[in-house]
Image (cartoon, grey):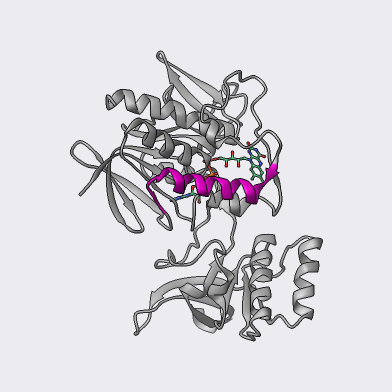
Amino acid sequence: MTIYDVLIVGGGPGGVAAAYLCHKRGLSHILIESGKAVFQGIANTYPEGKNVYPSKPKDNPEPFLVEELRPPDKPVAVEKYIQYVQHFVQHEGLNVQTETQFEGIEDGRDFLKVATSRGVYQARKVLLAFGSNIPRELSVYGDAKMVAKTLDDPKKYLGVRTLVIGGGNSAADVIISILKEKRNACDKEPIYWAHVAETFDVNKETAQRLGEEILLGGNIRLMPGATPRIGEVDDEGVDRLVIRVSEDKLPGGIERYNAMSFPMKNVIACIGSQGPLSIFDSIGVQTIACAEGVCQVAKEGDRLLLLTADFESTRKGVYVIGGAISPSYMRISKGAIQEEKHPNLIYTAINDAHHVIDAIAGKLQK
Ligand SMILES: Cc1cc2nc3c(=O)[nH]c(=O)nc-3n(C[C@H](O)[C@H](O)[C@H](O)COP(=O)(O)OP(=O)(O)OC[C@H]3O[C@@H](n4cnc5c(N)ncnc54)[C@H](O)[C@@H]3O)c2cc1C
C-alpha cells in the first residue's frame, strides 16, 4: 500500500494550499474531502452571491504566502472563487479524493494509518484542515453514518419520500431546494419534516420562500416532537433510520409509540454544527483548559489545542491548521505555553499551510 508523505484532511483554503505546496515541493500527498468537491465547507456556509474578501488580520505584516489561492483584491462572488479554485486543483493535478470522510488515526510502524469512510490510508504526516464547522452527528442507537448532513444534489431525492430532520433555517433551505426540484419534475412524493421540539424556528424570509413553495403545490408533512431513535439494517440489507413520531405511557411502565422508518439514503439531518473538539478528543491530541486570567481571546474553561510553533499537535506527526484552531490555540514555544490569536480567515488557513509544509519538507528532507 502507498505510504504518502502527507495526508491532508479537508479541502478548504488550508487543505488545498497544503496539497498545492506538497505538489510543488515533490512531497507525495493525498487530500481527502468529505464533500462532493473541494471548498465544500465554503459552498455550504456562505450565502449565495456573497463576496469573498482577501482580508488580513490588522496586526499581521506577512503577505499571502500562496498568491495563487488568494481571493482577488476586487471582491468576487463566492461561486466564482470556488469555480476558480476547482479549476486550479484540476489544472495542477492535485491528488484529491472527494466524498471521503476522516474517521480516525492509528499508529503504524514509521507512519500513521488514517481510517476513512473509504478505507485506510498510510502517511508519514497528517495535516488536519477540516475547518471549524463539523456537522453534528445524529445520536441514535446503532449507526446513522449514512445519513446526509448537507444537500449535495436535490435531484437525488426525486421520486422518493424524503425525511429532513432539524427545526431551523438550514433544514428549511434544504426543503425549499428539494421542493423546487420536485415541482419542476412534477414529483408529488412528500417531504417529511421532523424536529424534536414542538415548534419550528425559521426566520421570516425563509418562511416566506417556504410558504411560496407550499402554495405552488409543495407537499410537506410536518412531524413536530419526532425523535430519531435507531439505526438498523432491514431484511433486505437496507440501512434504515427509525424515528419515533408519538408516544404515550401506559400503566405498568409500558410505552406505546408510533414510529416511521426511512431508508437512510433518503434522510438529511440539518441539526447544526459543532467545533472540532470531539474529533481532537477521539484521536488523542491534547487540549488545555484556560484558567482564570490566562487567556485573552478564549473564555475561562474553554479548551484550546496545544500546538508547537510548526502547528504540530501533541500526537507526533499530526498537524492542525486553519479554522480548526480558530479563534485561538495554545502555542508551545521555548518551554513556555501561551495563547495565540488565530483569526478564522482564508489568509490564516493558507499561510498556516505554507508554514506547516515548510516544516514537514524540512523534517522529511525534501
Ligand atoms: C459566511 C462566511 C463568510 C466568510 N467570508 C470570508 C471572507 O470574505 N474572507 C475571508 O478571508 N474569510 C471569510 N470567512 C472565513 C473563511 O471562510 C474561513 O476562515 C476558511 O474557510 C477556513 O479555511 P479552512 O481550510 O481552515 O476550513 P474550511 O474552509 O472550513 O474547509 C474545511 C473542509 O474540510 C471538509 N471536512 C470537514 N470535516 C471533514 C472530515 N471529517 N473528513 C473530510 N473532510 C472534512 C469540509 O467539507 C471543508 O470543505 C467567512 C466565513 C463564513 C462562514
Asked whether, in this view, residue 113 is left or right of residue 72, the answer is: left
Residue visible at 64% across and 79% down in the picture: 182
The residue at the far front in this view is 91
Residue visible at 62% across and 72% down in the picture: 194
Q: Nearer the viewer, residue 284 or 252?
A: 284
Ligand 1 picture quarter: top right
Image quadrant where residue 223 sits = bottom right
Label tally: 0
| x, y percent for residue 29 | 34, 41
Give the prevailing secondary structure in the magenta stretch.
Answer: helix
Q: Nearer the viewer, residue 19 or 218?
A: 19
| x, y percent for residue 211 | 79, 73
Q: Is residue 10 visible?
A: no
Image quadrant where residue 122 sits = top left
Asked whether, in this view, residue 14 is left or right of residue 282, the answer is: right
Q: Give the residues in magenta.
A: 76-97
Q: Is residue 192 visible?
A: yes
Residue 89 located within the stretch drawn in magenta = yes
Residue visible at 46% across and 32% down in the picture: 353
Q: Nearer the viewer, residue 153 or 88?
A: 88
In the depicted structure, whether residue 214 falls above or below residue 201: below
Quadrant in the picture for the C terminus: top left
